[in-house]
Image: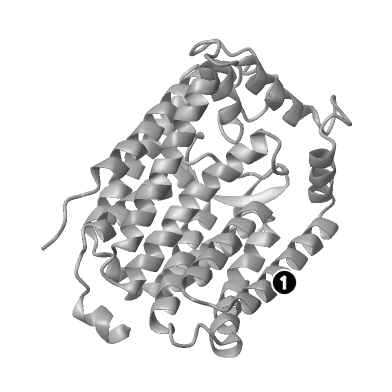
Amino acid sequence: MRKKPDTLLLGVTFGLVFIGMLMILSSSSYVGYANYADSYYFIKKHSIYLLLGLVAMTVGWRIPYAKYQQFLMPGFVGSLILVILTLIPGVGVKTLGASRWLQLGPITIQPVEMMKFAIFVYIAHFLHTKKDQIGSLTKGLLPLFTVLLVPMLLIAKQPDLGNDILIFVVTMCLIFVSGARIKHLASMAIAGISAVSLSVLIHPYQLQRIKTFLDPFADPLGKSYHIIQSFIAIGSGGIFGAGLGQSKLKYHYLPLQYSDFIFSILCEEGGLILACIVLTLIGLLLRQGLRIAKNAPDDFGRYLATGLTLQLALQSLINIAVVTGVFPTKGIPLAFISFGGTSLVMGLFYVGVLINIGMGQPESNSTKKAA
C-alpha cells in the first residue's frame, strides 16, 4: 500500500520558493528597470521557470522512480550531448568567460543540471547492482569513477569547478553510505583534491578567487569588491533587517544580487531572523529527504533519494558559505531562492522524485530484471 506524500517536505519547498519570489521581486527591481525599463522583468521570467518547475515536480511525483533505471543510458548520453553543445562556439552561450548555457528560443537552459540528475541515477543504479563489489577498488570504485570522469571533465572545460566539486562530494557521500572501504575513499579524496588543485593552477581566475578568499580586504575596489559588498549587506541587516524592499546594496553596489548573492540581500532586508528561517528550512529539507532515503523500498531508491537530497542541501549551504566568506567564490545558486532557470526547474523535479520515493512506489518487473 502506498504512503501519503510527505507534506512537510512539500511545505518546506514551497516556503523556500515563496521567500525566493519575494527576494527576487525586491532585489531585481532596480536592475530590471535600469537594464530593461521593466521593474518586473526578472520576476516575470522567474515565474515562467516556476511554472515549468511545478510541471516538472508533478512529472517527478507521478513517474515511478524505478523506471529511471530503464532509461539510464539514453538519459546519461543525452545530457552528455547537451553539455558538449555548450562548448561549441556559436552554439553555447558564453557569459563572464564561461560556456555553460544553451539558448532554446526565449529560454536559456544550463545542461549541467540535467547532467547531475543523470549522474545520480547512474550512481544509485551502480551501487544498487554492484553492492557486492563496492568494497573492491578495481571492480567497484574505479569503474564508477571512470564513467563519471567523462562528464566531470566536460563540466570542468566549461569551466564550472563549483558543480564538479558538488558532484564529487555527493558521490563520495553515496559511496561512503554504501559501505566502501575508508582507505579507498581516502585515495579518491586525494585524487579529487589533486584535480581541483590542478584546475586552480590552470585557470588564473580560480587562483585569484583563492587569494581573495584568503585576504578578502586586499583589493577593496578590485578583486575583493564583490565579497566586501556582500559583507556590508549581511552586516547592515542586523537582527531584524531593514525591511522588504529597503536594501541599499541592490542599487548596483552588489553584483548578481538577485542570483548567486541573493542571500546577502535577504540578510540585509530580513536580518538574522529571516536568515535563520531559511537555514531552518534547508535543515528540514535535508532531514526529510534523508528520512525518505532511509525508508525507501529498495537500495536504488535509497541511494537516489540520498543523492538528490544532498545535492539540494549542499548546493544551498555552499552558496551561503560563499556569500558569507567561508568558501571561495563559486557560481552556485541558492536552491529555490536564487533567480531561477534550469536550477529551479530541476530542483522542483528532484522534490517530485523524492515524494515518489517516499510514497513507496513498487518496483516494476522490468527494473527487477535489469537489476
Residue drawn at (52%, 61%) of the image: 82
Q: From the viewer's perspective, is 10 left or right of 120?
A: left
Q: Residue at x 85, y 58 (%)?
A: 201
When the figure is inspected, residue 351 is found, relative to residue 63, above or below; the finding is above
Rendered residue at 37%/28% (across/down): 18
Q: Where in the figure is residue 137, as x and y percent of width and height?
A: 60, 85
Compared with 133, 62 (above or below) is: above
Q: Residue at x 51, y 35 (%)?
A: 338
Q: Residue 206's spot in the image, x, y percent?
A: 79, 49
Q: Do we see residue 104 in this rendering?
A: no
Judge whether 344 appears above or below 357 on screen: above
Looking at the rendered structure, the secondary structure element under dot 1 is helix
Tell me the quarter of the picture where residue 221 sits: top right
- Say which amino acid is labelled 1: Ala
Q: How is the image coloured?
A: one colour
Residue 341 point in image, percent of width and height: 47, 42
The one of 154 and 35 positioned closer to us in this rendering? 154
The residue indicated by pointer 1 is: 191
Task: Tell me the quadrant of the picture where the N terminus can be found.
Answer: bottom left
